[in-house]
Amino acid sequence: MNNHQNAIFHQITNFLKTPLALLGVDLKNFQFNKICHFANHPYLCKGLTGEILMRKILLSVAIATTLFNSTFVFANSETEAIKQQLDTLKKDYERRIQTLEVRLLKTEENAKQANSKAQEVQVALKQNNTAQKISSGKNNFNPAISVILDGRYANFDNDPEDYELPGFALGPESGLGEKGFSVGHTEIAISANIDDKFYGKLTTAIAEHEGATEVELEEAFIQTLGLGNGLTVKGGRFLSEIGYLNKQHAHAWDFADAPLIYRGLFGNQLADDGLQISYIAPTDTFLQFGTELLSGNRFPAGGKANGLGAWTAFADIGGDIGIEHSWQLGASHWQANDIKGRQSGGHSHGGTTTETPSFSGDSKINALDFVYKWAPNGNPKNQNFKFQTEYFDRKEMGNVTMLNSGPPVETTSYDGHQKGWYAQTTYKFKPQWQLGLRYDQLDSNNTGSNVNVLKEAGLDNEGHTPKRTSLALDWLPSEFSRVRLQFNKDDSYEKSDNQILLQYTMSLGSHGAHQF
Amino acid sequence: MLYQWITKTGLAVLLLSFGLNAAYAKINVFACEPEWAALSRQLGGSAVKVFSATTAQQDPHHIQARPSLIAKVRRADLLVCTGAELEVGWLPLLLRKSGNGKIQSGQAGYFMAANQVALLEKPAVLDRSLGDIHAAGNPHIHFDPHRIQQIANALTQRLMRVDPANRSLYQQNGQQFAQQWQQAIKKWQQKTQTLQGKRVVVSHNSWVYLEQWLGLKKIATLEPKPGIPPSSAYLSKLLTQLKQNPAEMILSATYQNQKPAHWLSKKTSIPVISLSFSPVKNETLIVWFGRIVDQLIGVHL
């Protein structure tokens, strides 16, 4: 074996090892023969080739094995690593996305909260802006001032001067009023809470009497506010709690004129100076008791009594039946002992002097009243119905003298019994329209020692039962205005009278809360 | 001897019953409107007895000072009303007649919701020719849930002042209410996003707070002036206006006269949504408000 050749081969194989391995070429196909041919030595070549072949196979196996083995090892470990890396990457990104998502949610939440906070702040800001305005708004209406404008057109078949109620001696302001256009009682009322303990109200009426404009003090009273235990004390001049309608202002009435019994007993309405104490019981049903201590200076007491001239006692019970129905029942008593010279409307005998009846003695009135109201769903604004009735009974003992009569002065003992009632309904059938119907009836049984004097005083009923039927249609454009057309068939005295009244009543100024 | 014994025992029993009464006495709350009754019930819990002077069917402007209401105010420890002249036609009379010192204006027992929040639409000019307007501003504040929350906070404080024995209970109830209410507001706001900018016709101007909260646009009112019912001439003018410039719904309170709203709806085919102006009997504020929200969005399903 040639060392030289061997050496060469060795070198070749050594030389080829790496590139072959890299190229992955199969050594079998490698043409060493061609190199041998080059040498042109067949034997040599033959032997060489054989040897080379041998070596070649061995080598290639060796190389292949090494190559194979090494690539296998390499491939396995690398993919594992990449896989692991990818895994960690994936996990890492997932974690990051999750945290980002959480952060995003939180930010959104914060934004929402900030938004609602901002809204609250806005509201609070506005509140601060208007807080002062609210108080100034209250001051605008302190005290509450209201004016009632009242006017009418009246047409009577009979002469209103002839008006009388046989059996009843009429007091002042009991007439029918004037024919044609006239302005009624223009009321100015001022009221307010005086402080945390008292409420005060002043009502004046401006009216014309026989050509002279007079200012009348209708009400001027103070009243305790929340004295506690259901007690209220009122002092000054006020409308008495007798009956039901009496304590309401005339402008709140459902008809243009007072019921006949109010005209006959009180000269339309009873107001007096004094003190009123009322108590409301702590019960679910409304239960009220009260008393009034009065001066008795005004009709129908009309005496010049010292100190206590008259007193009243009243009791009311009331409640609801469901939401739509409510009711109230009241009983009251008025009494004046020792009336001295109550004068009522006089009449002249064609001369210069007017004979005026004057009553002295004791007087007692008992009264019953009942009111029922209905409103669909308890909502009186759109539709409502009201039924109201009152009964009065007066007994008097004393004597009646005709002032400016005689001589001798005409006088008689007097035992009077007068009674009367009315019933009325109103039906508001549309938000701005109301219809009213009323019936009045009086009766009297007065006796005395001198029937002629009773006759002259108007206390003889002349065998007549005074009665009246009234129908009214109200147009109520708003709660502050009313235009009313009323028709009366009036049989107060023997000669029946048809009366037509067109009246407006409007209120200016503060909202008046009306009693039940 | 026996007589003395009887008197003594009788007195003792009487005193004991008074004492027991005092210990178990609930705070009498007189609420002018059902929404404040509902709020008082929720905040007062077992410590209060609540009476609502009106129902959802009644117009709170026009309530009569009925004898039954006087009897209730007489025994009230706390008055919870709207204020801002909403109850001016009846509440002052009830207060004056009640002979009850605890609930007079300025006392702890006198709580007016409108005094706790800002009012919208405070008029610049007070003129009755503009209708029955309120000098203090629009009083129908209970349609804004944010204002309800402010009022609830103030009422909780007030209950704690009127009845210090139950302070912790009121505080707890107040917190619980706030939590539930805030959650509910979020829910309602999501639900009502579609209502933003919707054009509405209202029967009375009583929805300002709802309009503001939901972003509704009021384009007409069925009443020509607050408190004045519409005439047919006004309605036909409104009809032509709506034909040129249509709205998407007509809002009306259940207590209001529904005739004009339905007439308009028939002529224009704009749906009338008759909303309960206040919670019905024993309904909570959340349930009632949820009902309103559902009714409103129901049109746009």
Image (tube, rainbow, N blue to C red):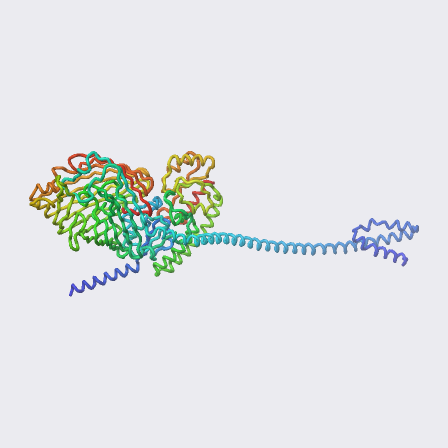
Q: Nearer the viewer, residue B245 or B259?
A: B245
What residue is shown at x 13% (from left), y 37% (from top)? A464
Q: Taking A471 as reference, is A140 above or below it? A: below
| Residue A165 drawn at (x, y percent) | 16, 40
| Residue A503 drawn at (x, y percent) | 27, 39
Name, please, the residue furthest toward the front: A352
Q: Nearer the viewer, residue A209 or A228?
A: A209
Q: Nearer the viewer, residue A211 or B262?
A: A211
Residue A445 sits in which quadrant? top left
Name, please, the residue furthest toward the right: A40
Which quadrant is the N terminus of chain B positioned in? bottom left
Name, please, the residue furthest toward the bottom: B1
Visible residue check, residue B180: no
| Residue B114 drawn at (x, y percent) | 39, 51
Quick check: B234 left or right of A190? Answer: right
Total count of labels: 0
| Residue A25 drawn at (x, y percent) | 80, 50
Visible residue check, residue A305: yes
Residue B20 sits in which quadrant? bottom left
Residue A161 sits in which quadrant? top left
Q: Nearer the viewer, residue A221 or B140?
A: A221
Quick check: A206 left or right of A447? Answer: right
